[in-house]
Image (spheres, rainbow, N blue to C red):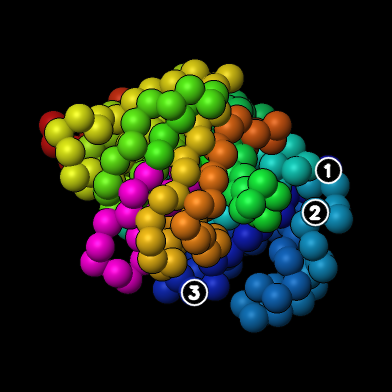
Amino acid sequence: MLTIGVIPNIDKKDVNILLARVVEFFSDKEVKIIIEEKAALELGYPHLAVESLLQKDVDLVLTLGGDGTLLNACRVLAKKNIPVCGINIGRLGFLADIELAEIESKLQKIIDGKYKIEERLMLDAIVKRNGAMTYVGAAINDVVVTKGGFSRMIRLGLSIDHSILANYQADGVIVSTSTGSTGYSLSAGGPIVHPSLKVLLITPICPHTLNARPLIISEDEEAHVKITATHHDIVLTIDGQVSHGLISEDEIIVRKSALVARVVKFDDSNYYKTVRTKLWRGD
């Protein structure tokens, strides 16, 4: 019997209606549905509640929300190599690409095994302070170093594998995966990179120079960012969801993680069609 975990974003409008639709579809199938306890109780499914999906033998996890819900699930579930499939009730739905009109047809494909699993590169972000490691986080989209509420820019030193590349003033810098190339990096002027390419993108945020440009490095290289700002309102952000405070002279090392995110895609998925319809929105 197939065991499917469901992670509903309880803050999304009408998620209860969507969850009911999913549960109803699987009700007469050879599928066991489980939901983490907090969401199960809040949405009225105590009989499907489990303490943690990580403690169960789960074949696949469905997220009900937007890309953020899927990103958060990928970071957590990567430790157990559990594939994640997203049903989109968010705004964009670039990763969570099952739309409401096609839920039943795509869920049937999951039952029939008619899907593929794409392994997406993840990043480790390591913060060193006075030579000691003080923080480690994993990202699927991006690692961002940016100024906080201060209007002043911060001064950054960028090195690749300890080879000094540049020093510049900016609002910050983004180190992203190819998966994250269509996120914050794109808004900051970075290129769109096909997610099958195992590379790191380095995109400065509003640099006060004409010479700082986006850069692509190989998956085997490390990006080192040294903070030389004089103020202390500086933040490291993981996938726009997890933050960690930084101070002057901190060093942030971003490199390929040993973890990978496993994202479910279907045969009719087409990356360039998704880019066209969800980013350019033109014919």
Q: Which one is earlier in the sequence, the residue at label 2 or at label 1?
A: 1
Q: Is residue 205 above or below residue 242?
A: above
**Element assignment for label 1:** loop
Give the residue number, with chain letter if any, for mark 3.
11
Give the number of the mark in front: 2 or 1: 2
| Disc assigned to residue 54 | 2
Q: Is residue 189 above or below residue 241?
A: above
Q: Amino acid at mark 1?
A: Met
In this rendering, position of residue 46 left or right of residue 124:
right
State yes or no: discs 3 and 1 in contact (Cβ < 8 Å). no
First in sequence, mark 2 or 3: give its number. Answer: 3
Q: Tell me residue 282's x, y (percent).
A: 14, 36
The amino acid pointed to by label 2 is Leu
Closer to the camera in the image, 146 or 229: 229
Task: Give, as a single range, the part of the protein colored magenta.
Answer: 142-156
Check disc 3 and report its element: helix, strand or loop: loop
In the displayed structure image, the side of residue 266 where residue 112 appears, left or right: right
Horizontal and vertical percent position of residue 221: 54, 22
Picture residue at 41% right of the left edge, 51% below the top: 228
Is 143 a magenta residue?
A: yes
Between residues 53 and 26, which one lies in front from this camera angle? 53
Where residue 213 appears, x then y in whole percent? 25, 30
Q: Which residue is mark 1?
A: 1
